[in-house]
Image: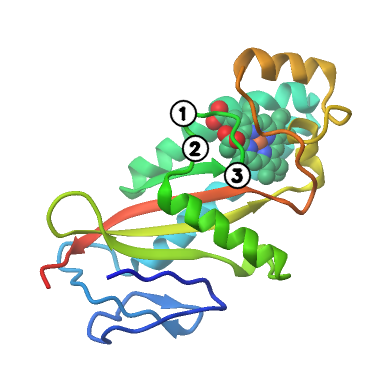
Amino acid sequence: MHIMLNQKHIQPSISSKWAKGLLLSGLTLSLGLAFADYKGENPMQESRDTAAAMLKELGQKLQAAMANGGPENAITVCNIEAPAIAERLSREEKITITRVGTRVRNPVLGMPNDWQTEALQQFAKGLANGEKPADMEFVQAVKAGSGSRMELRYAKPIVMQPQCTACHGSTEQISPAVQAKLKELYPDDRAVGYKPGELRGAIVVSRFIGYNNN
Ligand code: HEC
């Protein structure tokens, strides 16, 4: 079984039996799988909350560092703290959370896999259709890995803000000092040339939600 949706275009309902815990903006997404092995109450909401927490914490740290020393100082937030926050949340919540990009600065952490690429494509389409980033999300419940293991995949778009151009904008927008530092840290950097409003990437969360023996 394979479900994909965002809040506006929901393709719901295989059975209502397992609907508990998957409430999406008042709509019920029903997945034909058992949550017997899943200890949480609402995996969908938890994934959404974790993604929001990551964006919030990162945003605050970035803003503080930018105010206190500019983009040159703030590189460490993105370079060191972003992966650290993702790792901590992953451990605390027993999930996998990371950031991926439409073009990538850090090829190790930021490269989207197949489903993440699909999510990015859906977000790009949504933005082109005038949808608001805050309203968009991508959700999939799929068999993943060996046997009947089910995985819930969640993604939320990350859109360029004006302040992001200091490190992801045009050559004129990125100071020589920041360019030099980025070049040193990321020799294969592709994550430049973005404009405010453009899709920059996504926060992606995956988690185990049980077994489907159907
Ligand atoms: C001070 C410089 C700086 C600023 C400002 C900045 N970034 Fe980044 N960004 C980076 C660095 C450095 C990385 C690579 C992080 C890593 O090594 O994982 C990165 C990585 C990312 C990634 C992960 C994908 C990739 O390319 O590796 C996303 C998504 C992202 N930034 C979005 C944003 C957004 C949105 C903003 C504005 C809110 C922003 N960034 C502001 C420096 C910056």
Local crowd size for mark 1, using a 10 Å CA cut-off: few (<14), some (14–19), many (≥20): few
Answer whether residue 28 is visible to the viewer in this image. Answer: yes
Q: Is residue 74 above or below residue 161?
A: above
Q: Is residue 61 visible?
A: no
Q: Residues within 10 Å of mark 3 (few under 14, many from 20)?
A: many
Picture layout, residue 62 above or below residue 120 = above
Q: Relative to the observer, which residue lies in front, 33 or 48? A: 33
Which amino acid, mark 3? Answer: Thr
Give the mark nearer the N terminus: 1 vs 3. 3
Rendered position, 113 above or below 137: above
Q: Amino acid at mark 2?
A: Met
Q: Quadrant of residue 187?
A: top right
The kind of residue tagged 1 is Val
Number of marks present in the image shown: 3
Residue bearing mark 1:
108
Question: Residue 51: percent from the left, percent from the top?
Answer: 50, 54
Give the CA separation, mark 1 to mark 3: 14 Å
User: 167 left or right of 188?
Assistant: right
Q: Quadrant of the N terminus?
A: bottom left
* Residue in the foreground of this view, choosing between 37 and 136: 136
Ligand 1 has an atom within 8 Å of the beta carbon of the residue at disc 1:
yes
Residue 47: percent from left, percent from top = 42, 59
| Pointer 2 residue | 111
Q: Quadrant of residue 169?
A: top right
**Residue extending furthest toward the bottom:** 16
Instruction: Residue 16 in the image: state x and y as whole percent.
Output: 27, 87
Asked if the residue under mark 2 is in contact with the one under mark 1, i.e. CB atoms within 8 Å, the reply is yes
